[in-house]
Image (spheres, rainbow, N blue to C red):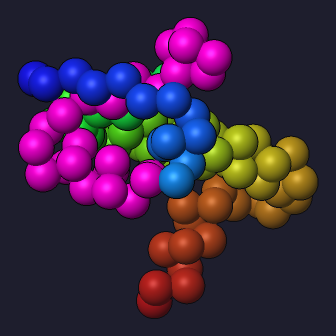
């Protein structure tokens, strides 16, 4: 993979072109501030996609568990939530 270094001002002024270059030419861009590397812009890989999907699923599971806890804390019925849903389906 080809690597290129650009200053933050150049990056700001040419962001669209640089992102296009990363996508089309699979270039890695190192962004510098006063000559010191501060960020890397690189192509989004299949591994990144898997990590992102996994993080979304983990977040959904955590929110679902939190919601289940909130429902359980205020549930006062003599039947379970599953029974209530089954009753609605009849």
User: Does the image show residue 38?
Assistant: no
Name the foreground residue: 39 vs 36.
Answer: 36
49 with respect to 87 (left or right): left
Q: Is residue 46 above or below residue 2?
A: below
Q: Give yes or no for residue 51 being in the magenta stretch.
A: no
65 with respect to 24 (left or right): right
* Residue 36 in picture, x, y percent from top left: 56, 10
82 with respect to 5 (left or right): right
* Residue 68 in picture, x, y percent from top left: 68, 48
57 with respect to 22 (left or right): right
Name the foreground residue: 59 vs 83.
Answer: 59
Q: Is residue 46 above or below residue 82?
A: above
Please give the name of the residue rendered at 55% of the width and 73% of the height, measured from the top-left corner: 85
The magenta-colored residue range is 14-37
Query: Which residue, as the protein is rendered here, is positioned at the far top?
Result: 36
Q: Is residue 71 above or below residue 88?
A: above
Please give the name of the residue rendered at 86% of the width and 45% of the height, measured from the top-left corner: 73
* Residue 15 in picture, x, y percent from top left: 44, 52
Q: Quadrant of the C terminus?
A: bottom left
Task: Report the number of numbered marks.
Answer: 0
User: Does the image show residue 42?
Assistant: yes
Q: Quadrant of the N terminus?
A: top left
Please give the name of the residue rendered at 49% of the width and 74% of the height, measured from the top-left corner: 86
* Residue 84 in picture, x, y percent from top left: 62, 71
């Amino acid at each position: 993979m080809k690597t290129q270094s650009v200053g933050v001002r150049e990056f700001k002024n040419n962001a669209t072109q640089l992102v296009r270059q990363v996508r089309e030419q699979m270039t890695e861009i190192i962004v510098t501030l006063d000559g010191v590397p501060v960020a890397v812009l690189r192509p989004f890989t299949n591994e990144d996609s898997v990590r992102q999907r996994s993080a979304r699923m983990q977040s959904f599971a955590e929110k679902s568990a939190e919601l289940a806890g909130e429902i359980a804390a205020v549930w006062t019925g003599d039947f379970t939530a599953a029974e209530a849903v089954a009753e609605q389906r009849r």
